[in-house]
Image (cartoon, rainbow, N blue to C red):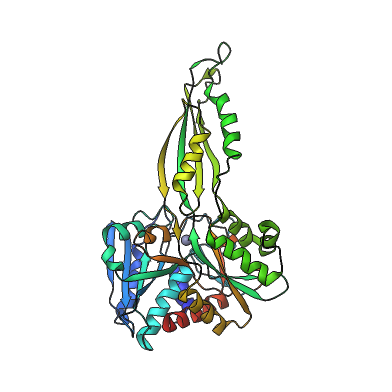
Amino acid sequence: MDVLELCRDLLRIDTSNPGSDEAAAAEYVADRLRAAGIAYELLEPAPGRVNLVSVMPGREPALPRLALHGHLDVVPADPAGWSHPPFAGEIAEGMLYGRGAVDMKGFVAMMLGLQLELAEHGRPRRDLVFCYLADEETGSVLGARWLAEKRPELLSGVAEAIGEVGGFSVALPGGGRAYTIQTAERGSLWFSIRVPGVAGHAALSGTANPVRRLGPLIERINALRVEEEPPAAFRALCTEVARLTGGPEDDPEPLLAPLGVFGQAALRGRRTDFVPTQTLAGRAPNYNVIPEVAELGVDCRYLPGGRERARTALESVLEPDMTYEMPASTLEAEAPVVGPLLEAALAAIRGHDPECRGLLPYVMPAGTDAAALSTLGIHCYGFTPLPLPDGFDYPAMFHARDERVPVESLRGGMEILFRLATDY
Ligand SMILES: [Zn+2]
């Protein structure tokens, strides 16, 4: 079965989160596996919210297992402004269009294609555990987090995992390509800061106006820097890019700028960021009322190991009467930047793409299902292989209008994944 057909079928199933559920996509995967005689288990933590786990036994069952994971849900898509409808799986000029083409039904189709291929032709070297997951786009609660908390035995013996985001190629200045691999990701903390004041008439009082206090607070948050070293993956990225391009290893901004959107994203992986995202105070039409309280929402992304550091830093810019809550958070993930899996990934890429000049480890600035799986001690890598034509801006496709993937890239990725799965 061609990976392209599998991907088109999956794109035609609307799994918008929020909006639709994953059941139909999980059923689609289940139907294919059943027809090929492959065992699987369906897990439904809430009605319609379905995960599927399936194990392909390896030739050397004593080896640690490798998990492959992909999420079945996608972010919603407003068809207005798309040049091809987001849930039709249309192909034009060598591109497959659809919500999820890169995030991440392309890889889900590769996982399924790999299972069907292995069922016909031979076995992987080690046991492979395939996880088709729900609910990644709104925090993994009914997907990876649920699986790690409620059914961890399904992942027993798994030492490493591959999933999003990485494996795509980036063009190097001066020619050739390198391939990315996510070896770490930042965790997130959401703060809701409460700034108190004294309510009153705007024309008469104003000494304790909480809205006025927001301004200096936001400035202090914008200027906030946490004292910390960049993660190993960031240092390894700089070393490798400097080797491949001759750029300045100790000056990350000019070094990574030629790598486009990927370079910009990777730069965020060197430090903790605090971004004010919400303000809440007062209410129209009462422009003459000083509110009693103002609230400020802040999105914080912290480096692996830096959760408490980030929290302490945020506290340092609050005044004594300001309090905060943390309505939600996610964990970080970090795996070694060298090792047999990375070597096998590079060998698999080179078997398909002789112009591959290296592998670029990096810190994913946002969160994925890897954080939840890491709580089980699994080393998670973002590696969904995809050899791309020069000029195709893959990171810009995530959650974007006209999300699309080159058809040949999908097939090339399938080849690389098959090599990796059978050789590693
Ligand atoms: Zn995703």
Q: Residue at x 50, y 55 (%)?
A: 366
Number of numbered discs overlaid on the protein picture? 0
As drawn, 390 above or below 148: below
- Residue 58 appears in the figure: yes
Q: Residue at x 68, y 60 (%)?
A: 257
Q: Residue furthest right?
A: 174
Return the x and y of residue 79 as percentages of the image width and height. Answer: 53, 57
In the picture provided, is 377 more to the left or to the right than 417?
left
- Image quadrant in which the C terminus is located: bottom left
- Image quadrant in which the N terminus is located: bottom left
Return the x and y of residue 207 as percentages of the image width and height. Answer: 56, 15
Return the x and y of residue 172 as percentages of the image width and height. Answer: 68, 71
Q: Residue at x 58, y 35 (%)?
A: 220
Return the x and y of residue 315 as percentages of the image width and height. Answer: 48, 35
- Residue 394 appears in the figure: no
As drawn, 368 above or below 26: above
As drawn, 268 above or below 249: above
Q: Residue furthest bottom?
A: 121
Corner quadrant of residue 54: bottom left
In front here: 122 or 319?
319
In front here: 81 or 393?
393
Corner quadrant of residue 392: bottom right
As drawn, 422 above or below 136: below
In the picture provided, is 105 more to the left or to the right than 53?
right
In front here: 241 or 87?
241
Q: Residue at x 51, y 35 (%)?
A: 316
